[in-house]
Amino acid sequence: MAGEEQLRAALARLADPVSGKDIVSAGRVSGIVLRSGRAGLVLATDGLSAHDAKTLEARIDAALRSVPGVEGARIITTAERGDAPQGPHPTAPAPLPEIRTIIAVGSGKGGVGKSTVAANIAVALAARGLKVGLLDADIYGPSVPMLMGRQERLTLRDKRIQPAEVHGLKAVSIGEMTDPDRAVVWRGPMASSALMQMLTQTDWGPLDVLVVDLPPGTGDIQLTMAQKVPLAGAVIVSTPQDLALIDAKKAVGMFGKVGVPILGMIENMSTFHCPACGHESHIFGHGGAEAAAAAMGLRFLGAIPLEIGIREASDAGTPIALKGDAAGNAFRNIAVQIQEALKETSRAADIR
């Protein structure tokens, strides 16, 4: 039976055209996986000509298939491609004709609970009867596998990534291709290239809406998504704290510059009720995101409390939106608000 070590050994027999080392020690390949006879990896092609990259990819494919038990191979290529063009792209071609609406969930900074919010929004939309996909585009800190209770490696069929079907939706994460104990050390253009391949080469099937969990900040991946994918709009997540709101406003500005509508803002960790005595505390302040949304003329989508139950549900891989408690209902109400906001933008399909 083939294993990942056998795959690594087969790849180590191939020379890197640039360094002369084998491609494993040269760092050309990462995320080597094998599931159900299908091998997969990420190939870094920076520094290679188009011809050399294509040749190396073919040699890797042959090497993987030469390992007993390997029936097929899937190679995701990454490369540094220089700066992306600036400005809005309102007529960007849709690379995914089966997906009716794509929304991005972003934040100006990390630590505001963006991934938790994105996962629960997706679950809440699915609970409303929609066909929903969830793409974990947070390349450097993928959280969706844990949030959705799926720690397995991705599977391939006919060279297409097969999304996990969990909690009523389809989900894909770069975390399903990389070692969870190792950092993903990719420059922005390389990460963007890998993300676009995951987006366009996943077998999503017909979807009413795809929710994309972006990395925090306003870097290459956010710009790539805004310029190369027909986003219907973006949802901005922030805590009420002034420090977080400063960066959230920057995220709003970035999407505005590239012509992506802002569907609204969400205030996460809005208030805390002590489970022992019921006292309400505003640990990170309260109402800041709602006030910021009003000042910028944006829709306020809703507030999510700071609750132990949300953390416990997230760690257990059972999103709180599946439950009927106050926190779960907060996410379900936000899903309604997002659908209402989508009706107001010409970029979105009717997903009522």
Image (tube, rainbow, N blue to C red):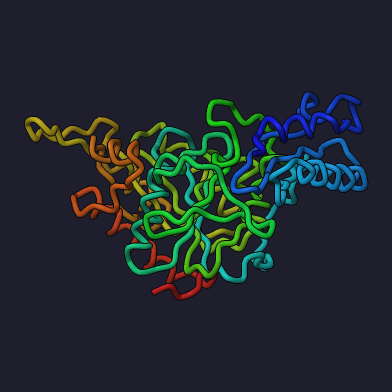
Q: Quadrant location of residue 25?
A: top right
Give left or right: position of 46 versus 154.
Answer: right
Give left or right: position of 141 versus 223.
Answer: left
- Which residue sits at x=68%, y=67%? 93
Across and down, in percent, residue 273 comes to: 16, 36
- Which residue sits at x=56%, y=52%? 255
- Front-most of residues 219 and 292: 219
Give left or right: position of 77 versus 217.
Answer: right
Q: Answer above or below: position of 202 versus 188.
A: below
- Front-most of residues 95 and 164: 164
Across and down, in percent, residue 99 comes to: 55, 68
Q: What is the number of callouts on the image?
A: 0
Give left or right: position of 272 versus 224.
Answer: left
Q: Answer above or below: position of 52 versus 72.
A: above
Q: Quadrant location of residue 27?
A: top right
Quarter of the image with the C terminus is bottom left
Q: Answer above or below: position of 63 versus 155.
A: above
Across and down, in percent, residue 262 comes to: 48, 57
Quarter of the image with the N terminus is top right
- Which residue sits at x=55%, y=67%? 205
- Which residue sits at x=39%, y=39%? 113
Across and down, in percent, residue 170 comes to: 47, 57
